[in-house]
Amino acid sequence: MPGSKIRVLLLDSYTTSVVSLNCTQSELLQHDIYLINRIDNANRDKMRHLKCICYLKPCDESINCLLEELRNPKYSSYELYFNNALSKSQLERLAESDDLEVVTKVEELFQDYLTVDKTLYSLALQAPKNRIYGDSMGTWQGSSFNTCTQGLLSLLLSLKLKPVIRYEANSKMGSKLAKEILYNVEKTNSSLFDFKLRDSPPLLLILDRKNDPITPLLTPWTFQSMVHELIGIENNTVDLANVPGISQDLKKIVLSSRQDKFYQESMYLNFGDLSDKIKDYVSQYKSKTKSSKDINSIEDMKKFIEEFPEFKKLSGNVSKHMTLASELDRRINRGRLWEVSELEQNMSCHDQHNSDLQELETLLLNRQTDPQKQVKPIPDDTKVRLVAIYALRYESNSNNQTTRLKNLLKEQGIPLYKIAIIDTLLQMSGSRSRLDDGQSIFDKATSNLITGFKTSHATDNLFMQHVPRLENVLSRAARGKLNESLYPILNPYGSSLPISSQDKAQDIVVFFVGGATYEEARIVHSLNELNKGIRIVLGGTTIHNSKSFMDDIEDAGDRWPKPTAEQRLHQRVQL
Amino acid sequence: MKRGRIIGAKEIDDSASTDSIDNVEVVESVELQSPFKADVLIPNDGHNTLSIAGDKKAKEAEMEDVSCPICSEKMLSLLQLNRHLDDEHGFGDNGTPTPMKTMPRTNTPSPLLTTPNEELRSWLKKTNEVRSKIQTALPRKFVNLDLFDSSNNSFSMSTEPSGQPSTNTTTSTNQPEITVKRSHWQRPTGRDKCTECHKTLNIKNGLVNCRKCGLLFCNSHSDFKVKLNENAQYDHEGVWSRCCTNCFQGKPGYNDYGLYEDLTKRFTTLRQKKVDERDMLQNKLEKRVINVSTMLNKIDREYHSTEFNSNFLNFRINSKKREVEQQLVNWEDGSHVLNCFICLQQFSFTLRKHHCRLCGRVVCGDNQTQCSMEIPVEHLTTLLDVPKVNNQSLIRMCKECKDCLFQKRNFQRDLKSPLTPLLQKVDNQQSIKKAILVLMPRFEDILKRLQTDQNKSKSLTQEASRLRKRLVDSFASFDKFTKEIIALEGLSKDEELLQHAIKVESATFIQENMAPLKQLPQLLHQLEANSNNKGMSKPKYTREQVTMIKQRRQELMVLQEQRFLVEEMVSNCKKQRKFDELPMLQDNLKELNGQIEQVQNTLGEEGF
């Protein structure tokens, strides 16, 4: 029977991003996949000589498209792969539609999440399209809750972990998610979770963003985080279309540590080290161009041609990173981030209310420090961000000036809905709402040498003094020092394997309700490097930069009921 | 001090096994290298407790019950304890044995006391504040700091799992039930190297046996823990034991991920039921078609033979036919049916009710929805491949029956239809590609052997040039097909996408795979110079001429290959609008063309 070896890959909107994060076009080509199409695209041509591979999320939308496809097949045979568990009725419906017996394989592959990096995953839930916060504080949006449960379950399955689940006692969302996961691990999917026991049971640690609102608000200074903060990374691609004078092929660039060695080496470097590294890279490129310029003999030419593809790749990469770095630099200067970040770090790590307030006002009012040079005022968003950090930092200070600062923002014509973010943040994660585990989130980097768990920080860097709370939580989790009353334990093993809070996990999966940050990803990366005995994977509902975080808060605060006068009074009294 | 001494001595038995070192402090300095081990030894003397805890900024301040661990004398503060230890138990500067000084850590006790840093001072203050009742359980509490499980908190588990009570008379009430065997341990010889980093092992950087594989490692490369049973095998019910990187990462399931669940079986069993049903239905319908067509045929023949044509007869024929049709299937009672069961339109004066002759259901005859249509019997029987009936009468059938009868047939017919020109070419191209990929490793292997082989054996070179020729031919036809594919026009939208993908893929394939081909001519060049041209029998040329022609030909081949490559690159550059690289390439091309012409001229009629 005539049939081509060429294969078609059909994806849905969700798996398209999963696949694009995980492999390149040429990798697909190597597996004879020459055509990639969307299953919801009804205008595909009938090519009944080609074999088809479907990789889909088992959601109603995709299943319905697939049913239609099977009833009227456009290709000769189908292999169906789903990235999460298929329900019984879905399987039945598929079987009933396959009149022509075109399906040759049905498989669940469990990868219902986006792998951003080796140790970082995301569920890409972000307001307003996929908001996670419900209509009052501490509640979930139903659909997002399901996505989180399914995504986390598929993550655990793909890593073959049957974890002990711990969450933060003060987080309603965390506890709901934890219990749902436990229920699924114990009941619904118990046959799938029948893994071999490990030496120490793995740990799923569900954290709530509200316990550390500071980290996403601060300006980061490492390569990956900066690109996300200043330009924005989406599915490992960066949109540079707004950069003035950008060339056509650099409008959309891919930043993947798997494909780009230079990026892999430099993604966690701070801005200073990064510029050195790029300098090296450019000089390396220069020396190569030089050698390729003087082609005199056939020998030279041969060498040049052999090296040419490599050379072309290098030149593309060099210009990519050069553009990126210079764009970062441009945006830093435009946003006056050196000054802003210094103040942020001062506020977050030191307790100097008066000088911080003074500095803050200088920036807000754009008082000119140097009469020779007129500087532009900082952007509105940055102003709100600074006041938000101030409000969180000095919430309990007797001389707190948040109200005055908010009025000041109002006078400058900043829209009220933006200023409301500050209130929502205080309401959501003010000092009373945060988990009191004896560890301040306003923590300074120290080179701690904790027994059995190594961390490393450049303590002398003015702009990177603050350390995300995550590091401390992880170091305690690794040493079995998480308090059981603050981090309750849910044990899927039941009485067969009693778990105590002193157990030290060797595999930790962290999930941030409310989004993780690249800065935390960097921390996790360095912890993994330093502590070979422990493996940590980080993820969250999304990966935030300050803007997306504030948008999330704004969207949620908009819908949450405002605290009544009574509640506000109560709050005051408690303070 | 007793306890510390015993354990220290045991550690030496474990790792050094020689009696040359019997100094407790020496062992302690070893242990200090690894943070968690230091904690294990804390109960041995309060001295280390001090220096290490100082580092940790007194995180476990509540545990500080200050009494001398040696003589159990109560102390007011750690400062006092420290001095007491120095004076009474000889831990001071003069009492400290020499190895203490070579410790990499700077905070040996005495410097700590003489120049206490800020941290330590504040810490000492704190400990005084939180000091509670003196408890005798001091050692136990410190052991909890250990990274190992509290269930194994006797000292023996990290230093010596098999600690027998013969010497260990003091405490160790918590003897572990499992003792990991040690017979497989590598015995230290005194000049051992870490199996992983190959550093010479000594007491300072550790001399540790991996409890699993038994090999010797330095401290930092044995800083992992797994659970082992008595036979030093992985066992999640065993005891925590120290091990090396390899044994840690080699434990079963360590790198095991990517779960998939094959549902094909469940799917096919579910499907089988449906498919059987469908096949049965199809059979039934086919039979009905045959019956209807033969019956209709019979009626027609009966009446046509009379050759008497009138309206009345037509009516008779039609009613007769209807009778026959109704005999075959029960017609649904149309009086209660309000909507067509396929398109759900309401029947009306304009939308009449019809009966499907194969299933008997009421269906509309709307031409737009094509819920039912009338098909000539003759046509039907040809399509269905049943005994042919030459009859012009029409049979009405609904869409569902039609799909059931024809969908599978059509699908299979499509599968059997010949490939489109594009797919055909692509398939040819792909099979050539496969062949190249098979030949390539063989060729590379021979090349490698040629490079290393000093004898330059003749058969090898012949084999190499033979393979090379085949490869060059393959590349040529690969390129031919690629060009044909690119040239194809009038394709559908998806085929155009396919065409583009092939174009991209072929370009990279050629770029990546043609490099080794270029190496052979150089090699042969050298070989040819040495060879004695025995095989040459053409009288037309002298040996020298033949060699020259051969050389030139090879040169020409190389040049042409390169020209091909450069042309490819030029077109790539143009496509990607990388004009900055273009001039360089074009210069190259010009030069190459010149060279080729030159060589071709010298070759004259002996060229290709």
Image (spheres, coloured by chain):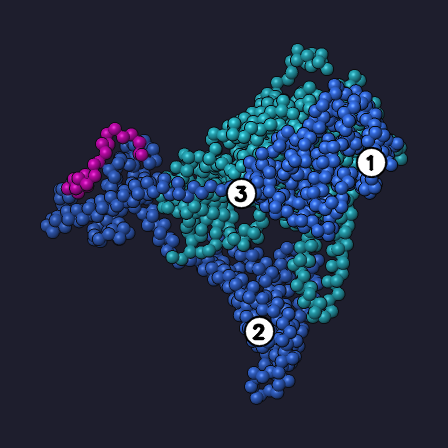
**Dot 1 amino acid type:** Asn
Q: Which residue is mark 3?
A: B258
Residue A86 inside the magenta-drawn segment? no
Rendered location of residue A372, percent (x, y) = 89, 35
Mark 2 Cα-neighbour bin, 10 Å: few <14, some 14–19, many ≥20: some
Q: Chain of mark 2?
A: B
Q: Which chain does blue denote in the image?
A: B
SS under mark 2: helix
Q: Residue at x 19, y 41 (%)?
A: B328
Q: Residue furthest left?
A: B306
CA–CA distance between discs 3 and 2? 46 Å
Among the chains pictured, the one given cyan colouring is: A
Q: Nearer the viewer, residue A504 or A157?
A: A504
**Is residue A59 toward the left or the right of residue B592 in the image?**
left
How many numbered callouts? Answer: 3
| Front position among marks 2 and 1 | 1
Q: State the image quarter where residue A450 is shown.
A: top right
Q: Residue at point 67% right, 74% down?
A: B595
Mark positioned earlier in the residue sequence (3 or 2): 3
Q: Earlier in the sequence, mark 2 or mark 1?
A: 1
Q: Which secondary structure lies at badge 3?
A: loop
Q: Which residues are magenta?
A: B320-341
In the picture of the structure, the residue carrying the numbered disc 1 is B107
Instruction: Say if A305 sits above or below A401 in the image.
Output: below
Gap between marks 3 and 1 measured at Cα: 48 Å
* Res. B29 visible in picture: no
Question: Badge 2 is on which residue?
Answer: B460
Query: Which is more foreground, mark 3 or mark 1?
Result: 1
- The chain letter for the residue carrying disc 1 is B
| Residue A453, quarter of the rendered image | top right
- In the picture, the quarter occupied by the N terminus of chain B is top right
